[in-house]
């Protein structure tokens, strides 16, 4: 199922406060840390969809990141409270696409996109089970 | 100055051993950590070009990441020794592009690209000084 | 001003959810990450005392860690919500001592203690200003 | 087997270059990162003793940190090359003690101590196998 960014399949907003350890000598949130925030966004979006990623792993389903892309627009600093919007933009039986927008107030700090694939305990790709697919897109395939 | 990946302006290889802290509950090197490795690659490529990024910062020049993209092909695990090739692929007076290939032996684990911009102490973009440009591309603009 | 742990000068509780990136290949929250949580606890305890550490740094006051000690009692895992109690146990004009207890529900996961010193922009020790001292202990020296 | 620090059971030195991501807004190596370095020291000390921690985990033996203590004497900065000495100071069938000294040239930056316990796949404590004990102390118990 494919969507435009304007009408994502689902999305959620989370607030994240920048930790001191996440800053670097430049005084900014380190660029690698944005991807940690995006992962938090995915966890919370799954939860908003009635899914728990920790349970998924216990059941032998693991999301691996296949592709990441990020454009950094403005820096963030220690103790700032940022708002991350995470949206599911495409779900097929072999991958899930997300988009992300990180803001401080109205200011866009970064926008990003990712593609995840599902793998089993053996690390090999597995198709999304129907029950998971329905949870993610809100209706059967 | 623009180049193809086959003929980068300059490149260098560094070996990096995966640290335990960099792994996650899946048993893999966490995807955000790849960008830390790429940063190490840039530091060492500058050094190979006769530049020291720590000195650049002391002189008031700071590289900020404007764009990152990475495709993850295969996972890495604790204690594996990986080889990262970092290449400068484009240098203009306002940005520097790099490409990256991370391998374990012959196996390609990830390939990536980034765009950096130079900023001053005030965080505002500044053009690359001629001396820096020459160091990076090996000849005047 | 010296106190027992039973009657700290001040304390606060914060809830922290374990992030995926903070786990390691053993499936546990990595031990180095506990110290990141304790730092979050100190930030929030300062805030509860009407202080903002980010403002302190802007005014040229920096806390550096002089000593850390931690006993790890039980592991934590991804997505668990932990409760961290941070207590100021001693404040003098040259150092501040804290104690920490990290729990999941009633289970004690770790207990720790730290000593911080205040330094100026030059990295040299500076005595705690009276106004800061009063905020921390609730009364003049 | 118990030893003094002056005559540790075994020790090794490793050089570690401070990564940019490991610095914080104060411009220093973040204090939580020291414990990551100590973990690297333990991995390399095991290797110097003819042991591979990755193999130990594959065989179902996991070291967990039970106690950590560190005194921070002087800060480190980006790109500095530090020397970490890691020493095994005590080995019994239920725990292993290490001591650490981190230096930049002759300057002592930090000194620390840790106690590890061995656990099995189920997370329960297990006694050190004889073969491991012999490797660590150089002779039978």
Image (cartoon, coloured by chain):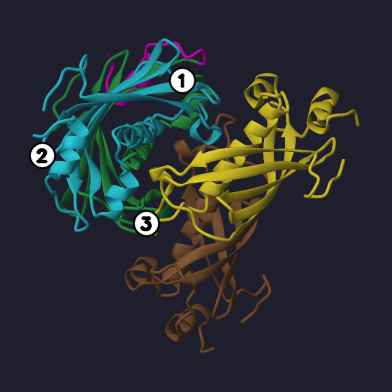
Chain colours: A brown, B yellow, C green, D cyan
Disc 2 and disc 3 on one polypeptide chain? no
- Residue receiving disc 1: C61
- Residue beneath label 3, please? B25
Q: Nearer the viewer, mark 2 or mark 3?
A: 2
* Residue D60 in picture, x, y percent from top left: 24, 54
- Left or right placement of residue A86 versus residue A44 in this view: right
Extreme residue in the bottom direction? A140
The answer to whether dots 1 and 3 both sit on one chain is no
Residue B122 placement: quadrant: top right
Q: How far is the residue under mark 2 from the one under mark 3?
A: 28 Å
Q: Chain of mark 2?
A: D
Residue pointed to by mark 2: D93
Residue B51 appears left or right of A98: right
Quarter of the view holding residue D105 = top left
Q: Residue furthest left?
A: D141
Which residue reaches farthest right? B141
For label 3, the SS is loop
Q: Is residue A73 left or right of residue C115?
A: right
Q: Pointer 1 and pointer 2: residues touching (CB < 8 Å)?
A: no
Disc 2 secondary structure class: loop
| Residue C135: quarter of image | top left
Q: Is residue C77 above or below residue C11?
A: below
Q: Is residue C115 visible?
A: no
Disc 1 to disc 2, how far (Cα)? 47 Å
For the N terminus of chain B, the quadrant is: top right
Chain designation of label 3: B
Residue extent of the magenta highlight: C121-141
Q: Looking at the image, is D45 positioned above or below residue A95?
A: above
């Amino acid at each position: 199922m494919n969507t435009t960014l304007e009408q994502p399949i689902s999305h959620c907003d989370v607030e994240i406060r920048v930790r001191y350890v996440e800053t670097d000598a430049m005084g900014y949130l380190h660029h690698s840390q944005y991807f940690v925030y995006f992962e938090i966004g995915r966890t919370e979006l799954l939860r908003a969809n009635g899914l728990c990623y920790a349970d998924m792993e216990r059941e032998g389903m693991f999301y691996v990141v296949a592709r990441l892309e990020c454009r950094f627009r403005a820096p963030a600093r220690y103790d700032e409270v940022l708002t991350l919007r995470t949206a599911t933009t495409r779900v097929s039986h072999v991958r899930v696409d997300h988009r992300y927008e990180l803001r401080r107030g109205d200011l866009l700090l970064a926008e990003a996109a990712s593609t995840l694939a599902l793998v089993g305990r053996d690390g090999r790709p597995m198709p999304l089970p129907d029950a998971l697919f329905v949870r993610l897109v809100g209706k059967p395939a």
